[in-house]
Amino acid sequence: MASAGEATVNASHVGKKKKSAARYWENPQGESKDENKDVEDGDQTETTEKVDQKKTQEAKKRKQEENDMAGKKFISGKSDPFPGPAPVPEDRIQKFKRKNKNKMPRPHPKLRDIIRQSDKASEMSQEQAARFDLLLPEDAGFLEGDEGEDTCMISQEDIANAVDITSGAKHFNLKLSQFGPYRVDYSKTGRHLLIGGRRGHIACLDWQSKQLMCEINVMESVNDVKWLHSESMYAVAQKKWLYIYDSRGIELHCIRKFNDVLRMQFLPYHFLLATASATGFLQYLDVSVGKEVAAICTKTGRIDVMCQNPYNAIIHLGHHNGTVSLWSPNQKEPLVKMLCHQGNVRSVAVDKSGTYMVTSGMDKKLKVYDIRAFKPLKSYFLPAGASCLSLSQRGLLSAATGDIVQVYRDVWSTPVTKPYMAHRAQGAVWGLQFCPFEDVLGVGHGDGFTSMLVPGAGEPNFDGLDANPYRSAKQRQEWEVKALLEKIQPELISLDPHELGQVDQASFKQRHQDRVQALGFDPLATEKFIPRHKKKGRSSAGNIEKRKKQVAHEDQRTVIRRTVEDKMKIQQEREAREKKAAVLSSQKSALDRFKK
């Protein structure tokens, strides 16, 4: 028989093996039950110190879980150390800022809710655009020369030999000396090219695959060519009238209202074709319904300089007296008139953000203007002036002087002393345009067409829902239907597009004054009737409401009575005038005998 001391030694927990924490992947439920039975004696012998320690650990864990409710919990029980979405830097958010928050003095509750929802949606889209900006894989690059080498001295052949085969194939020449000079226009996606010769030659092609879509000769002079909303239709300003053709060269329309057209611009989000004619008229054609929206007489004579502001769809016209005027289809007068040159304006170009305008004139000057303040920023002197101007998506400026094409970089931020690139064409340049989403400049000259490589000209990342260069025929059809449904009405074209999201306080006050004059009293300024308190239970809620309604009905009766009396007076006066006129007409005069 064992002694008492030995029993105490055997019951001690010092030599016991501590059970490890259970994991759900280690043992099935049946085995865990048996193990629980085996270790019951060990659990009963735990000291009070360990119980207190467990309680404190559980309390700390519970508090940590409460603090990290937004954090993501893993299988191990740990919480996410970086809960919520990743923060976006403020400078990147400012890059995609669309508008300022609307500040209104005590708006209507429904209007306040609408404005709050609009601001919330704008902030969310702004944050998403800034967050997804990291996912854009492409970046724009520029041409850099060796030490002491000037980039404008590098020829197109050297660039084409240095780049890869796909990019090198984008530099080519079309020798068309018989029907030149040529106007040039790229489609919105940058995939298709349209050229029109002065002597009637028109061709459209997929310039990247060099696949010809159609080629015709209209047998009369061509002043300008322009793609419409897609590559399936284009407009041609011929000698007398405006014609619409499809991509196979079939004539769809001959619009005789638009005569003697010299230049054209297409507004893609409004489906409007703006034309400037030799008679001094600025006309707008809605190509979705085929109707003329507006015809404005500018009273400035022949108009052969024209461009559009992509930011607000305002048309810029250059005139022979050195002025540049800004036009909208909603007004018969110019919105703004700027004196830019001392002689005739030869060309105008506006960047895609609608901030800067570049003009060239007969005074051999190239000027850069800030359209927001309508003030000149920079002025450059060109020895022979610039006949054609074009701005790329990345802010490069191309200027054509005779048969020489020069490309400038950062013309509005820093003073430019030399061109970024230069190229001599085979004839006098007549058309100039940068290709969207490509580092390519299309030059139409007297000897045909030249495709120049200009590194850093195009936007490297495109919006697949707006202008997708790789879309299929089915995607183009779906985009066309969606664009027609989202077409912007011409009445919404204005200098400042942000005005559409604001409340016109002046017009609201004017409408309120008209309403006061029509009613004879101010409905918003009437004081509410407060019933007098009566005793003996006569001031119950029902009695008070009855008295309020009775007073309101009496006010309405007086107003109705006044309006009826005014109508009766007007009717009596009219009857009196008619009776007097009848009496005068019934009287015979001496001249009635001569009537048959």
Image: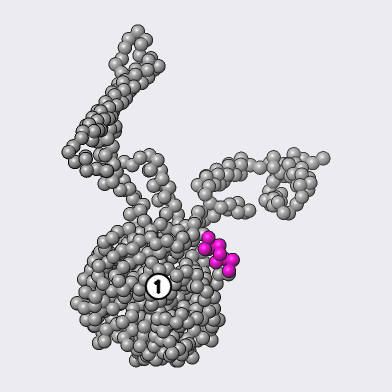
Q: Is residue 48 left or right of residue 216?
A: right
Q: Nearer the viewer, residue 149 or 51?
A: 149
Examine the structure image and report whether residue 478 is included in the region drawn in magenta. Answer: yes
Question: Residue 337 placed where, x, y %?
Answer: 23, 66
| Amino acid type, callout 1 | Trp
Neighbour class for label 1 at 10 Å: few (<14), some, many (≥20)?
Answer: some
SS state under label 1: strand
Magenta residues span 473-481
Would you name the residue on which mark 1 appears? 241
496 over 319 or under it: above or below: above
Q: Quadrant of the C terminus?
A: top left
Q: Main secondary structure of the magenta part?
A: helix
Q: Nearer the viewer, residue 368 or 181?
A: 181
225 over 564 or under it: above or below: below
Is residue 366 among the parts visible in the rendering?
Answer: yes
User: Could you tell me which residue is drawn at 31 percent across and 12 percent down?
Assistant: 534
Question: Residue 279 placed where, x, y %?
Answer: 30, 71
Q: Is residue 259 left or right of residue 474?
A: left
What kind of colouring is applied to the model shown? one colour
